[in-house]
Image (cartoon, grey):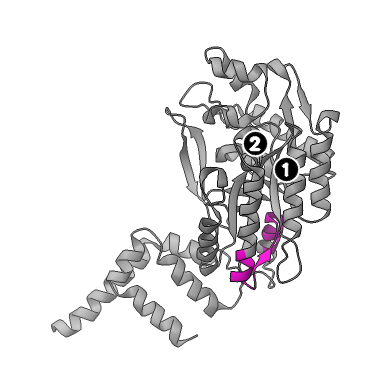
C-alpha cells in the first residue's frame, strides 16, 4: 500500500476518532435548540420582600423598559427573580410580600407585570436558610449584627446567601430531603397566593442547588430552571460554589422534566460590567443561535446596596438603544416563553431548517474545549465548513 493510499486512510481514522471521542458533546450541541432571531433578556435577581425603596427603583425601571420596543412592538422585558419574605429584627418571625409593609413594592411589581415589562420568577422564600444563619451567628459578629437589623441580604457573607445547602460550617452539607421538600412546598404555595399562579420559572439563589431541590420544584409545577451552564451543589472549604455534578445546555431536561436555560452573561454596572460588554455578549449568542440572558441584581439600582439608580438606568437605556439599532430583528421575551417555545418547537422562534442548524452547529463545536483546536489542525472543521457553504 502506497503512502498516497495510507494518508487518506489515516486522515479518515483521525477524523473518525475525533468525532467518536467527542460524540456526546457533539450530539448535545446538535440537539440544543437554535433560535431564529437575536433575543435579549435582562435577568434581575433579589427583588421582593425588603426595603420600601425598591418600589421607587422598580417604577423607574418600568418606565425605562417601556421606552424600548422590538420589531414586533413589544416593550423590553426584565425578569424579576423574587424573594418572598424578609426577617424581622432578631429573626423573630418574617414579613412576606403579603404584609402591609411590602405593599408599595408589591404594587410596583404587579404594575410592571400587567404592562408586560416585568416577568416574574421565583428566587426563594428567603435568600438564605434560616437555621444556617442562626448557627453562623453563634461565632460570627457580622451575622449577629445583620440579624439585629436585617434589610439587605447583599451584606451577608456570600456563602450564607446560599439557600439550598447548609453553609453554617464549611465545606457545606446537604439539607435533609424532607426539609427541602417542605421548604419548596411552602415557597411555591406563597408565590401562588401572592401572584394567583404557581411559579413557572425558578432562579436558584447563588446558583447552588441539588437534584432533590430541582425535583421538588418540578413536582410543584416549575417548568424552567435558570442555570449558569452547570449545577453546583455545595460550598467548598473556602466558601466558593462547588461540587459540580453536571453540565447544562439550553433545552436540556432535568429532574421531573424541568427544562434548563443558560444565563452566563452579565450586566452589572456596579461591578463595571457596562453596556459594551453586554452588547458583545448579544452578538456572540446571536451568532451561536442562543438567547442572550444577562444577569444583573437589584443592588445596581439601590443606593443602600452601593448602586446608583440614575447611572444604572442610563446604562440600561444605552444597552437597549444600541441593541435595537444593531440588531433590527431583536426580540424581547420572558424565560417562560422561551421554555414553552423550546418544548413545542415553535417555528416562530426555533429554527427547523437543517442546513441553517448545521451552520450554527459548526460554530458551536468550533468552541468546544480541545475539540475545536484538534479538529481545525486535522482539517476536519475547514472541510465541514466548506461542505456547509457549498450546500447553503
Q: Identify which residue, 154 or 230, lies in the foreground.
A: 154
Residue 144 locus on image (x, y percent): 60, 15
Is residue 138 depicted above or below 306 in this figure?
above
Distance from disc 1 to disc 2, alpha carbons, whole Å, reads 10 Å
Q: Residue furthest left?
A: 2
Q: Identify which residue, 376 or 293, lies in the foreground.
A: 293
Is residue 45 depicted above or below 37 in this figure?
above
Q: Residue furthest top?
A: 138
Name the residue that disc number 1 marks.
57
Residue at left 67%, top 69%? 349
Q: Identify which residue, 311 or 28, lies in the foreground.
A: 311
In the image, taking residue 11 as reference, residue 254 lies left or right, namely right
Mainly helix, strand or loop, the magenta region? helix
Q: Residue furthest front?
A: 310
Residue 204 locus on image (x, y percent): 61, 40
Residue 89 badge? none
Q: Quadrant of residue 290?
A: bottom right
Q: Quadrant of residue 8?
A: bottom left
SS at circle 2 = helix
* Magenta run includes residue 240: no
Residue 242 locus on image (x, y percent): 46, 37
Label located before the other in sequence (1 or 2):
1
Residue at left 84%, top 52%? 114
Name the residue that disc number 2 marks.
303
Q: Is residue 109 visible?
A: yes
Q: Quadrant of the N terminus?
A: bottom left
Q: How many marks?
A: 2
Is residue 237 depicted above or below 58 in this figure?
above
Whether pointer 1 and pointer 2 mark residues with C-beta atoms closer than 8 Å, the reply is no
Q: Residues within 10 Å of mark 1 (few under 14, many from 20)?
A: some
Span of residues in magenta? 322-341
Amino acid at each position: 500500500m502506497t503512502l498516497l493510499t495510507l494518508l487518506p486512510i489515516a486522515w479518515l481514522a483521525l477524523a473518525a476518532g475525533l468525532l467518536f471521542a467527542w460524540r456526546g458533546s457533539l450530539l448535545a450541541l446538535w440537539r440544543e435548540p437554535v433560535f431564529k432571531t437575536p433575543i435579549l433578556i435582562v435577568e434581575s435577581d433579589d427583588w421582593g420582600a425588603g426595603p420600601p425603596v425598591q418600589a421607587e427603583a422598580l417604577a423607574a425601571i418600568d418606565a425605562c423598559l417601556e421606552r424600548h420596543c422590538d420589531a414586533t412592538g413589544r416593550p423590553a422585558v426584565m425578569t424579576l427573580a423574587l424573594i418572598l419574605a424578609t426577617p424581622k429584627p432578631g429573626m423573630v418571625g418574617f414579613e412576606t410580600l403579603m404584609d402591609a409593609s411590602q405593599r408599595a413594592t408589591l404594587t410596583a411589581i404587579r404594575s410592571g407585570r400587567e404592562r408586560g415589562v416585568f416577568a416574574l420568577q421565583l428566587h426563594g422564600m428567603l435568600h438564605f436558610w434560616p437555621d444556617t444563619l442562626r448557627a453562623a451567628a453563634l461565632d460570627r459578629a457580622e451575622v449577629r449584627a445583620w440579624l439585629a437589623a436585617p434589610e439587605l441580604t447583599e451584606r451577608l457573607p456570600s456563602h450564607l446567601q446560599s439557600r439550598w445547602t447548609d453553609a453554617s460550617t464549611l465545606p457545606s452539607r446537604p439539607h435533609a430531603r424532607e426539609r427541602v421538600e417542605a421548604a419548596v412546598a411552602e415557597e411555591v404555595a406563597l408565590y401562588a397566593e401572592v401572584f394567583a399562579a404557581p411559579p413557572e420559572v425558578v432562579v436558584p439563589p447563588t446558583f447552588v442547588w441539588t437534584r432533590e431541590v430541582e425535583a421538588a420544584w418540578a413536582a410543584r409545577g416549575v417548568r424552567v430552571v435558570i442555570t449558569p451552564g452547570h449545577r453546583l451543589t455545595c460550598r467548598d472549604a473556602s466558601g466558593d460554589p462547588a461540587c459540580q455534578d453536571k453540565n447544562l445546555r439550553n433545552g436540556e431536561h432535568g429532574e421531573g422534566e424541568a427544562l434548563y436555560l443558560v444565563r452566563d452573561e452579565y450586566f452589572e454596572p456596579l461591578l463595571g460590567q457596562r453596556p459594551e460588554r453586554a452588547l458583545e455578549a448579544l452578538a456572540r449568542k446571536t451568532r451561536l443561535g442562543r438567547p442572550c440572558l444577562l444577569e444583573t441584581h437589584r443592588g445596581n439600582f439601590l443606593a443602600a446596596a452601593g448602586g446608583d439608580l440614575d447611572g444604572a438606568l442610563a446604562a440600561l437605556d444605552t444597552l437597549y438603544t444600541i441593541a435595537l439599532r444593531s440588531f433590527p430583528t431583536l426580540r424581547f421575551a420572558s424565560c417562560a416563553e422561551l421554555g414553552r417555545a423550546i418544548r413545542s418547537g415553535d417555528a416562530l422562534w426555533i429554527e427547523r431548517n437543517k442546513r441553517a442548524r448545521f451552520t450554527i452547529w459548526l460554530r458551536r463545536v468550533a468552541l468546544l474545549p480541545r475539540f475545536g483546536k484538534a479538529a481545525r489542525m486535522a482539517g476536519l472543521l475547514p472541510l465541514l465548513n466548506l461542505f456547509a457553504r457549498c450546500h447553503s
